[in-house]
Amino acid sequence: MKKYFLSNLILAFLSGAAIGQENASNPLAAVNNTDVRLQYFDLDGSSERYDLWADGAYMLTPKLKLKYELHYWDTDVIGTRESGLETLHVKPIYFPTAGEWGSWKYKLAVGAEWIVGFGNEDEGIGTGSDQIAPLAGLALVKGNTVLVPLLQHFVEYNGPDVNQTSVRLIAIQSLPNDFWGKLDAKIPFDWENDVIPASAELQLGKMFSPSFGTYVDGLFGIGTDRPYDWGVGIGLRFNY
């Protein structure tokens, strides 16, 4: 029952009204969008994972945004190929203030992320933990450049222990002819397991119209605790 309820919840937010002018690759952008993404991860040279997911957002008010993700995995990490729903993420984000700091415009954000698993961890899909993750961030804009530092802490309320603090830096550069480039660096400090599974994503995309775009991702694990070796991805973007 929980699987069907959570799946229906995500579908309730797949429609919106105004077309946003900001880049939806910025998690703090004031946009209504749904992205359909497929990513491939080489985990350790002998196993792999495909992640098919919906990644979207809806502006409930000018100061309140709701982000959501629904992930479906296909993986052979346990030695046999298994597939199923992994997690649902629901993330309300509030923007209490905005202004200018010298030549930069800024927007402050606070919020929390609710992460619910679908109980497929025995098949190597997900961690088996339902989590809550408060967050704080800042969007800085200067010309065609956007910088977004984010800080988030993850703890479980159901399932195996989770105690992780994630530092994230996103840089987005608008390019000629409606192209954009993005760097997304993530450095999680896993206090429970004493590891730092860092990673980075490079993205190149193009908007073909105000309401439709595509992009490709290059994915890289970093350091000895990396969560995967490398990966690639593609995405379709629909702005509303």
Image (cartoon, rainbow, N blue to C red):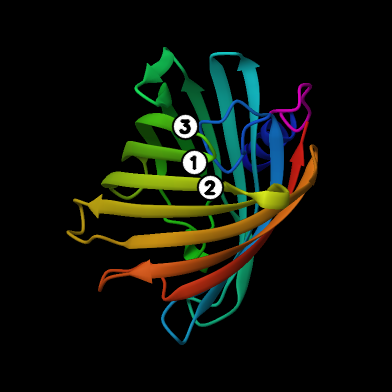
Image mark for residue 129: none
Q: Measure how far apart labels 1 and 2 are at the Cα level.
A: 5 Å
Residue matched to label 2: 173
Q: Secondary structure at mark 2?
A: strand
Mark 1 Cα shell of 10 Å, populated few (<14), some (14-19), many (≥20): some
Which quadrant of the figure has residue 103? Answer: top left
Residue matched to label 1: 145
Q: How many marks?
A: 3
Q: Quadrant of the N terminus?
A: top right
Residue 83 image position (x, y, % from top left): 63, 66
Residue 185 image position (x, y, % from top left): 38, 54
Highlighted magenta segment, given as a residue range: 13-20
Q: Is residue 225 left or right of residue 9?
A: left
Amino acid at circle 1:
Thr
Q: Are marks 1 and 2 in contact (CB under 8 Å)?
A: yes
x 41%, y 81%: residue:
44
Q: Earlier in the sequence, mark 1 or mark 2?
A: 1
Q: Is-magenta flag for residue 16?
A: yes
Q: Quadrant of the C terminus?
A: top right
Which quadrant of the figure has residue 57? Answer: top right
Q: Is residue 119 above or below residue 100?
A: below
Q: Measure how far apart labels 3 and 1 are at the Cα level.
A: 6 Å
Q: Are marks 3 and 1 in contact (CB under 8 Å)?
A: yes
Q: Is-magenta flag for residue 5?
A: no
- Residue farthest to the bottom? 46
Residue 110 in view in this figure: no
Residue 104 in view in this figure: yes
Q: Secondary structure at mark 1?
A: strand
Amino acid at circle 3:
Val
Residue matched to label 3: 141
